[in-house]
Image (cartoon, rainbow, N blue to C red):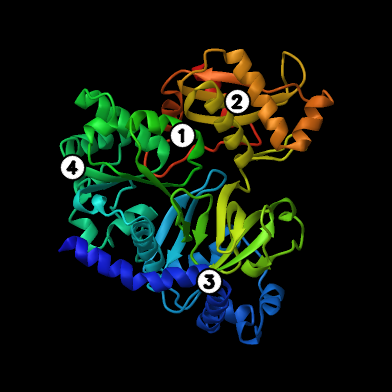
């Protein structure tokens, strides 16, 4: 009966899925008009003359691209009790985030934007069923490793981590099979929480597991230690689908395949506090299908021109395949031409599929090379595959004052399976980087930089580091690239 209900829902949604592929631009244009109309009587809309916006060109003229620092005074007005500030009425939640370069951010979620977060996560799984025909995961237990669902109030508005907020809106047909329990999800201490999650799930028929790769890897390792099993596939014989997002999965994939010990399906998603933007719709697939009709209007700015005073910006129909773009969104939560900080690259325009390439602030360009996360992640993945190595976590930073010679990039890598020839691995990794980034290659060939240095960290080093900065577990991620030594200098303590 339950399977039949899910199949019925999939059938009802199939026409919408087809429209995402065929009518993407028309759906985006409809979103644009709806958003401008919805926001024109707000304080922001009046201030930016939304009533006079008749075209995308008008919007670009009236609404510059901004980040959270511009919107913070508007959010503070909402916290003080004002209505109709960024969107009609008041938000029903604030998604609280903590950036690496600023304090807490409060991203509004309205009753109109909440369905984007809930339905998009649901639709990702329904799309998986629609495209693969596989439904076996439905009849087991699901685990979503997330933040605490306990919420505070800020200005009378409930506030917490997005994953905790979403936990309150999980549909009943998912919640009946969802683990861990509410009480376990509320545990703040990650290591205590992990033990509790293991205790609740180890004897269950786990079929679907979701979470950020570094933390799911810790969960898997703890399951194997407690169960005495050799692989997760043995511990959870019905486990068939792993859903991930938040970081590029490629550097972790080989380690996951070893831990699981048999073939299962992986599905990638692209959620953020500002919205749920895309998810994988083909298995296997390169790229994630953009969601065009969920209360979000997308704009794209060439990432290498983002810092210009008036950078070029294009709507979806103006993008080109292969260009690295900064993602800018306007939403029915009241974000307008808002830079979320992520960069993307389209791999297809029919339909519109993209890959997440990194963060605007997560790059290394101390010497003019502008290396981005996608380059270091794919280079490391390629060389690990060649050498049969596996990694748990890594980060890259510039080493300007190198006591042993010319400046270079310093890589801090925690291997779960180290290469037999570390020196050759290091040389090969540098060659892979030169192939991906011509500026880096020129600097190395010109002896401005020496080839990269690789520091192999002991097991658990990144966990200890994240714990030391209060970011252990949940949705916290280690930046794979920094343009300074703030992380690298801390990691040298563990060498």
Q: Is residue 338 left or right of residue 222?
A: right
Instruction: Name the residue tied to disc 2.
Output: 411
Element carrying mark 3: helix
Element carrying mark 1: helix
Distance Cα–Cα, label 2 vs label 1:
16 Å
Disc number lying in front (3 or 1): 3
Q: Which residue corresponds to the image point at 19% horizontal and 35% vertical from the top-left?
A: 202
Of pointers 3 and 1, the one earlier in the residue sequence: 3
Q: Position of residue 416 (x, y in %)?
A: 43, 23
Quarter where residue 404 is shown: top right
Q: Residues within 10 Å of mark 2 (few under 14, many from 20)?
A: many
Q: Which residue corresponds to the image point at 52% horizontal and 81% vertical from the top-left?
A: 34
Nearest the viewer among 442 and 237 is 237
**Mark carried by residue 465:** none
Of pointers 4 and 3, the one earlier in the residue sequence: 3
Element carrying mark 2: strand
Of pointers 1 and 4, the one earlier in the residue sequence: 4
Distance Cα–Cα, label 3 vs label 2:
43 Å
Distance Cα–Cα, label 4 vs label 3:
39 Å
Quarter where residue 57 is shown: bottom right
Distance Cα–Cα, label 1 vs label 4:
25 Å
**Residues at badges 1 and 4 in contact (C-beta under 8 Å)?**
no
Instruction: Name the residue tied to disc 3.
Output: 22
Instruction: Name the residue tied to disc 4.
Output: 205
Instruction: Name the residue tied to disc 1.
Output: 252
Question: Where 189 sits versus 35, above or below?
Answer: above
Of pointers 2 and 1, the one earlier in the residue sequence: 1
Q: Residues within 10 Å of mark 1 (few under 14, many from 20)?
A: many
Q: Residues within 10 Å of mark 3 (few under 14, many from 20)?
A: some
Element carrying mark 4: loop
């Amino acid at each position: 009966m339950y399977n039949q209900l899910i199949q019925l829902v999939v059938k009802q949604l199939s026409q919408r899925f087809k429209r995402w592929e065929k009518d993407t631009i028309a759906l985006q244009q409809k979103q644009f008009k709806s958003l401008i109309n919805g926001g024109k009587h707000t304080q922001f809309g009046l201030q930016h003359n939304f009533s006079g916006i008749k075209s995308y060109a008008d919007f670009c003229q009236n609404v510059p691209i901004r980040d959270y620092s511009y919107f913070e005074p508007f959010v503070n007005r909402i916290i003080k009790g004002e209505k109709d500030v960024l969107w009609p009425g008041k938000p029903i939640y604030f998604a609280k985030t903590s950036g690496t370069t600023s304090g807490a951010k409060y991203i509004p979620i309205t009753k109109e934007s909440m369905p984007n977060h809930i339905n998009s996560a649901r639709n990702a799984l329904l799309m998986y069923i629609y495209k693969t025909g596989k439904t076996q995961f439905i009849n087991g237990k699901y685990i979503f490793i997330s933040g605490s669902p306990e919420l505070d109030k800020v200005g009378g508005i409930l506030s917490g981590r997005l994953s905790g907020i979403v936990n309150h809106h999980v549909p009943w047909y998912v919640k009946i099979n969802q683990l861990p329990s509410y009480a376990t999800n509320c545990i703040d201490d990650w290591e205590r929480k992990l033990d509790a999650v293991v205790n609740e799930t180890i004897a269950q028929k786990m079929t679907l597991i979701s979470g950020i790769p570094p933390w799911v890897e810790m969960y898997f390792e703890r399951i194997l230690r407690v169960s005495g099993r050799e692989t997760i596939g043995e511990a959870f014989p019905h486990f068939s689908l792993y859903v991930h997002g938040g970081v590029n999965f490629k550097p972790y994939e080989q380690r996951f395949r070893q831990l699981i010990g048999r073939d299962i399906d992986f599905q990638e998603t692209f959620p953020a506090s500002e919205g749920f933007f895309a998810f994988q719709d083909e298995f296997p697939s390169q790229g994630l299908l953009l969601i065009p009709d969920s209360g979000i209007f997308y704009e794209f700015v060439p990432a290498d021109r983002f810092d210009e005073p008036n950078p070029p910006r294009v709507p979806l129909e103006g993008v080109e395949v292969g260009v690295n773009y900064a993602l800018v969104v306007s939403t029915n939560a009241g974000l307008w031409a808002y830079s979320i900080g992520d960069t993307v690259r389209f791999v297809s325009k029919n339909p519109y599929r993209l890959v997440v390439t990194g963060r605007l602030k997560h790059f290394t360009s101390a010497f003019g090379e502008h290396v981005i996360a996608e380059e270091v992640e794919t280079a490391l993945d390629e060389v690990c595959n060649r050498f049969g190595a596996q990694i748990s976590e890594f980060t890259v930073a510039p080493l300007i004052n190198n006591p042993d010679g010319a400046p270079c990039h310093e890589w801090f890598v925690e291997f779960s399976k180290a290469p037999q020839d570390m020196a050759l691995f290091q040389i090969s990794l540098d060659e892979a980087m030169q192939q991906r980034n011509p500026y880096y290659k020129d600097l190395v060939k010109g002896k401005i930089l020496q080839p990269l240095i690789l520091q192999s960290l002991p097991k658990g080093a990144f966990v200890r580091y994240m714990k030391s900065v209060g970011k252990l577990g949940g949705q916290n991620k280690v930046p794979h690239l920094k343009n300074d030594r703030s992380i690298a200098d801390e990691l040298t303590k563990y060498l």
